[in-house]
Each structure stands twice: as C-alpha cells, then as structure tokens.
Amino acid sequence: MDTESALSALNALSQSTRLEIFRLLVRHEPDGLPAGDVARHLDVPQNTISAHLATLTRAGLLTSQRHSRVIVYRACLPRLRELMLFLVKDCCGQSPELCEPLVAELSSCCPSE
C-alpha cells in the first residue's frame, strides 16, 4: 500500500458514520449486509447510507455485489490488512519485540483461518 492509498482509506474512516458502517460490516463477514439493512442497523436514512457506502467503496474498504434489486456490501478484509500493515510496517524501529503486545492482541481478537 502506498501513502496515497492509506490516506484515502483513513480519510474514508475518519467520519463517524462511515467508521460505524465499516465496523458493522466487519462484524457481518463473510456474508455482508444489504444497504437497507446497514441503514436500519445504524438508523441512518437510505440516501445518506448510499453516499457513505460509495465513499468507503471508492477507498477500497468495501466491495459490493448486486443480487437482483439488492446490493450486498462486504468489508474488504484484505484492504484492512494492507492498511494495518502499512501503519505498523516500521513498528518500533529495530526493536520488533516492542510490537509483540500489539501483534498478540490483534492475533487474539482475529484468529487466522
């Protein structure tokens, strides 16, 4: 991931509703949620949700798939992984042991498949 891509993703997540949307969709992996369900879960008008979903999709944080008249959105976990790795790539300089607590905590909440 390059700096511009990271900034795009971070900018998309820097708004509270978009952050809530992303976190909701991460919780609903791997199935995702239709846009209308996202709006209902967060009690946000459909047109507002659509704008936020578009922003997150442009940043590469969401994918969508049309099923007839319904669009199902999913969190793009590989993109999240890229962003997280970009943020900690140079973690702790030449002392990787300083990052071990972070890695351990991430591993315990997100066990690998």
Image (cartoon, grey):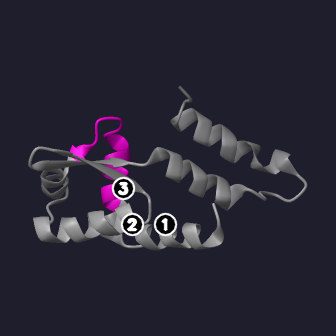
Q: Are marks 3 and 2 in contact (CB under 8 Å)?
A: no
What amino acid is at disc 1?
Ala
Distance in Å between CA atoms under marks 2 and 1: 9 Å
**In front: label 3 or label 2:** 2
Mark 3, residues whose alpha carbon is within 10 Å: few (<14), some, or many (≥20)? many
Mark number displayed over residue 58: 2
x and y percent of residue 101 in the render?
Answer: 71, 44
What amino acid is at disc 3?
Phe
- For label 3, the SS is helix
Q: Nearer the viewer, residue 99 or 37?
A: 37
x and y percent of residue 84 in the render?
Answer: 60, 54
Distance in Å between CA atoms under marks 1 and 3: 11 Å
Mark number displayed over residue 9: 1
Residue beneath disc 3 = 22
**What residue appears at the point 63 percent right and 60 percent down from the top-left corner?**
1
- For label 2, the SS is helix
What amino acid is at disc 2?
Arg
Mark 2, residues whose alpha carbon is within 10 Å: few (<14), some, or many (≥20)? some
**What residue appears at the point 52 percent right and 46 percent down from the top-left corner?**
78
Left or right: residue 110 versus residue 49 is right
Q: Can residue 45 be seen in the rendering of this structure?
A: no
**What residue appears at the point 86 percent right and 59 percent down from the top-left corner?**
93
User: Quarter-wise, where is residue 18 in the image?
Assistant: bottom left
- Which comes sooner in the sequence, label 1 or label 3? 1
